[in-house]
Image: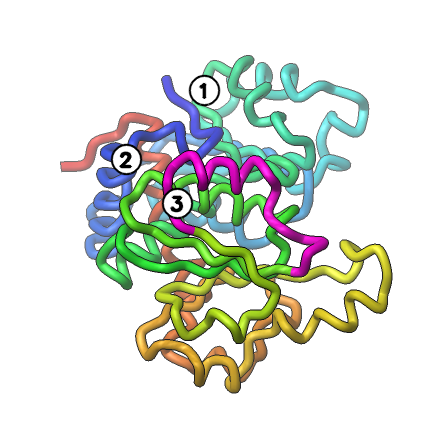
């Protein structure tokens, strides 16, 4: 039995196999429509989520399986003080696989250590979001044809963004990926992430203006810059427009640059950008369903001929 707590839980070879399976699911959905008939997925979401929870549920339903679970901590026995360890012990008797979202870092690992069924980390605090990373990798691989030899800009809240941390660590295992880290000084990527980049030998630079780098990017990964992350409003007002992607900035970009975003979006990408063929963040959400279907099949060891 295996779990997915971090994107690094799978080797590069296993990741490649998983992405290939996701591509086959996209091309042949009927082939997999009853692959998990009789199986149940438990979605244990201790904090709000739209895309991730519904994406997991859609993935299992597309495979012919069933779904049970809760969408917030207040509707579970956590409101009565039940521990994560006890919850997963009980759920292990009700379901075949579980996806957990929790505000505390390490909660999914605690669950995995006490579970009789595979556990998927659907986001733990500001730490990891491995299935979003799988969706990001599938999007880049499907639309660029490779996961090496490109420059990616990551823009916005790089300090607290778990999707950013997971994606950087995953891409460090591929050759010749350059990172451009674009954020206000207050929201710089954590030191341990830059230490990982240095240790890998990958190139990176840290800048504070999107306009200064967008022309060299093959992929732009946008995230939210949240007002509440700043120590004072003056700094927020001074910097906030530097991290809004609009048509004017898109004119500076390569014709084949991809724009990704883990969503939800607030105002960091102007709606006028949505019509640009380089904006693939809604397609990215569709890829997330395919890759979660592939992950469920892989962890349940279901083979489809």
Considering the numbered disc 2 on the image, is that residue within a helix, a strand or a loop?
Answer: helix
Q: Residue at x 26, y 33 (%)?
A: 14
- Crowd class of label 1 (few under 14; some 14 to 19; many from 20; radius 10 Å): many
Disc number lying in front (2 or 3): 2
Q: Where on the picture, by quarter, is residue 240?
A: bottom right
Inter-mark Cα distance, 2 to 3: 12 Å
**Residue 25: image x %, image y %?**
25, 49
Rendered position, 196 above or below 20: above
State the quadrant of the N terminus. Answer: top left
Q: Looking at the image, which is closer to me, 38 or 111?
A: 111
- Crowd class of label 3 (few under 14; some 14 to 19; many from 20; radius 10 Å): many
Q: What residue does disc 2 label?
A: 12
Looking at the image, is mark 1 or mark 3 earlier in the sequence? 1
Inter-mark Cα distance, 1 to 3: 21 Å
Q: Which residues are magenta?
A: 184-203
Which numbered dot is residue 134?
3
Inter-mark Cα distance, 2 to 1: 24 Å
Q: Main secondary structure of the magenta part?
A: helix
Considering the numbered disc 3 on the image, is that residue within a helix, a strand or a loop?
Answer: helix
Residue 299 lies in the magenta stretch: no
Which numbered dot is residue 117?
1
State the quadrant of the C terminus. Answer: top left
Q: Where on the picture, by quarter, is residue 69?
A: top right
Q: Looking at the image, which is closer to me, 195 or 19?
A: 195
**Residue 294: image x %, image y %?**
31, 41
């Amino acid at each position: 039995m295996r779990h997915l707590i971090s994107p690094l839980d799978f080797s590069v070879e296993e990741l490649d196999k998983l992405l290939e399976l996701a591509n086959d699911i996209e091309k042949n959905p009927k082939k997999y429509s009853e692959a998990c008939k009789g199986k149940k997925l438990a979605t244990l979401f201790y904090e709000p989520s739209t895309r991730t929870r519904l994406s997991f549920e859609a993935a299992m339903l597309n495979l012919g399986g069933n779904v049970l679970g809760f969408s917030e901590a207040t509707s579970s026995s956590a409101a009565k003080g039940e521990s994560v360890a006890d919850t997963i012990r009980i759920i292990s008797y009700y379901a075949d696989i579980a996806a957990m979202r929790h505000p505390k870092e390490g909660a999914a690992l605690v669950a995995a250590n006490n579970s009789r069924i595979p556990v998927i980390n659907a986001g733990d605090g500001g730490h990891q979001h491995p299935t979003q990373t799988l969706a990001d990798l599938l999007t880049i691989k499907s639309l660029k044809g490779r996961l090496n030899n490109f420059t990616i800009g990551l823009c916005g809240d790089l300090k607290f963004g778990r999707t950013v941390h997971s994606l950087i660590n995953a891409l460090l295992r591929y050759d010749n990926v350059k990172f451009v880290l674009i954020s206000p000084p207050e929201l710089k990527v954590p030191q341990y992430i830059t230490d990982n980049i240095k240790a890998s030998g990958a190139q990176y630079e840290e800048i504070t203006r999107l306009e200064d780098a967008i022309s060299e990017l093959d992929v732009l990964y946008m995230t939210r810059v949240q007002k509440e992350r700043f120590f004072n409003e003056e700094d927020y007002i001074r910097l906030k427009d530097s991290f809004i992607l609009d048509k004017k900035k898109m004119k500076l970009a390569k014709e084949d640059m991809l724009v990704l975003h883990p969503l939800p979006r607030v105002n960091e990408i102007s709606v006028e950008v949505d019509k640009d063929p380089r904006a693939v963040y809604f397609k990215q959400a569709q890829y997330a369903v395919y890759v979660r279907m592939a992950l469920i099949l892989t962890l349940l060891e279901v083979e489809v001929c």
